[in-house]
Image (spheres, rainbow, N blue to C red):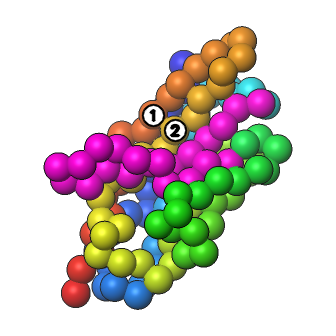
Amino acid sequence: QVQLTESGGGLVQPGGSLRLSCQASGRTFSGDIWGWYRQAPGRQREMVATVTSGGTTDYAGSVEGRFSISRHNGLNTMQLQMDSLKPEDTGVYYCRARRRYIPQYDYWGQGTQVTVSS
């Protein structure tokens, strides 16, 4: 079993930056996809950014050009650099690691709060 732990959330003013980190305890396998998802109050959870074990990235249109996702396979960590933050970026940010092929898994972290407000 793998546990994902997020850190780095907080309160920031519009236009500011935050860097989120996700640490996995336990073994993960190549060929998986890690990602950041967020959920704002009253809204469904949405994908923010994903990165494969090979380094291919994907971003939601609303964060393209402002956020940058990265991962370090050897250390089982992932980061999300968030710049030019907007109030609409507010929400709980979750780390996810999933693998579609055997061994299959789909792990979620507990989430970290990000609030963008003046």
Mark closest to the chain's N terminus, 2 or 1: 2
- Which amino acid, by three-letter code, is at mark 2? Arg
Magenta part, dominant SS: strand
Q: Residue 49: within the magenta?
A: yes
Residue furthest to the front: 61
Residue 41 vs 89, above or below: the answer is above
Residue denoted by label 2: 96
24 or 63: nearer the eye? 63
Report the magenta residues as a range.
31-51
- Which amino acid, by three-letter code, is at mark 1? Trp
Which residue does the image show at 59% across and 29% down from the upper left? 98
Q: Residue 116: within the magenta?
A: no
Residues at badges 2 and 1 in contact (C-beta under 8 Å)?
yes
Give neighbour class at mark 1: few <14, some 14-19, many 20+ (Cα, 10 Å).
Answer: many
Residue 26: % across, % down: 62, 28
Q: Is residue 21 visible?
A: no
Q: CA distance from mark 2 to mark 1?
A: 5 Å
Residue 13 vs 31, above or below: the answer is below
Which residue does the image show at 31% across and 85% down from the upper left? 13
Which residue does the image show at 47% across and 66% down from the upper left? 62
Residue 49: % across, % down: 56, 54
4 or 43: nearer the eye? 43
Q: Is residue 41 visible?
A: yes
Residue 41 vs 66, above or below: the answer is above
Left of 49 or right of it: where is 41?
Answer: left
Left of 108 or right of it: where is 59?
Answer: right
Residue furthest to the left: 42
Q: Circle 2 — which element?
A: strand
Residue denoted by label 1: 108
Residue 115 vs 32, above or below: the answer is below
Residue furthest to the top: 102
